[in-house]
Image (cartoon, rainbow, N blue to C red):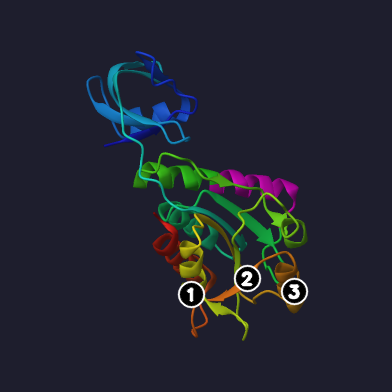
Amino acid sequence: MHRCYLPAADFSSPTLTLEGEEAHHALRVMRLRTGDECEVFDGTGHAARARILTSGGGRLMLGDLRPLPPMLPVAEMTLALAIPKGGNMELIVQKAVELGVQRIIPLVTERTIVRLNAREAAAKTTKWQRTALEACKQCGVNTLPVVEVPQHYTEFIRRTDMPELKLVCAILPEAIPARKVLEDARSAGRQGTLLLIGPEGDFSPAEYAAAMQHGFAPISLGPIILRVETAVFMALSFARYALDK
């Protein structure tokens, strides 16, 4: 069933109006017509099934609203990663949303190849946020994750608005197996985490030192050196498996 995004939707109202790009996609791409059903979600966890009452003038009038039950709770996960080269960031955003991430923070580190000026960073953020929205529509997630504007690693590492459990995927001898760290976190009742993943050339020694100074625990994903996107999917999967209720 086609899913439409309508921020600030009032599901207690008898009708909803869908306009703009979402209405255009429903009418011109999905070919929905009067009488067809769709799902509407507001990006904050609420959704309803609705019937198209009228369509025309580039808008849809939706009625017969039936609120859907909330999704089962999942572990709160924030992903911070060095921006990879090529189009891999879009793939990472898409799959991270499918794996239940609530926030994605693109980073510029010492060895990050991609460098963006303010205008490019804003454009990329808009594009990645759109990718996150499309992933929500595709996989049935009703809470739209936030993709933040790219920021420098030195600024990010000092932030205090992060989950208490902060983990950096590390290629270091002292890194603890991710399974042990996450199982211990589950036993301690932790329900969320921040996962930090470096660039193709890894974090510099100074960046590793800064991470640990600011409370990050180094974890290992195993003996095989992984590409950035593979490390992201593996780390998020570990966290979901260990921390979900």
Which residue lies under the disc numbered 1? 180
Whether tag 2 and tag 1 are in contact, CB under 8 A, the answer is: no
Most common SS among magenta residues: helix
Q: State the residue lying farthest toward the left.
A: 35
Quadrant for the N terminus in the image: top left
Which residue lies under the disc numbered 3? 209
**Numbered disc 2: secondary structure:** strand
Q: Position of residue 223 (x, y in %)?
A: 50, 85
Q: Is residue 16 left or right of residue 189?
A: left
Q: Is residue 124 left or right of residue 91?
A: right
Q: Position of residue 57 (x, y in %)?
A: 40, 16
Pointer 2: residues within 10 angstroms few (<14), some, or many (20+)?
A: many
Which residue lies under the disc numbered 2? 217
Quadrant for the C terminus in the image: bottom left
Q: Nearer the viewer, mark 3 or mark 1?
A: 1
Q: Residue at x 63, y 70 (%)?
A: 217
Q: Nearer the viewer, mark 2 or mark 3?
A: 2
Q: CA distance from mark 2 to mark 3?
A: 11 Å
**Numbered disc 1: secondary structure:** helix
- Residue 120, magenta (yes or no): yes
Is residue 185 visible from the viewing direction of this image?
Answer: yes
Q: Is residue 104 left or right of residue 73?
A: right
Whether tag 2 and tag 3 are in contact, CB under 8 A, the answer is: no
Q: Position of residue 94 (x, y in %)?
A: 45, 53
Q: CA distance from mark 2 to mark 1?
A: 12 Å
Magenta extent: 116-128
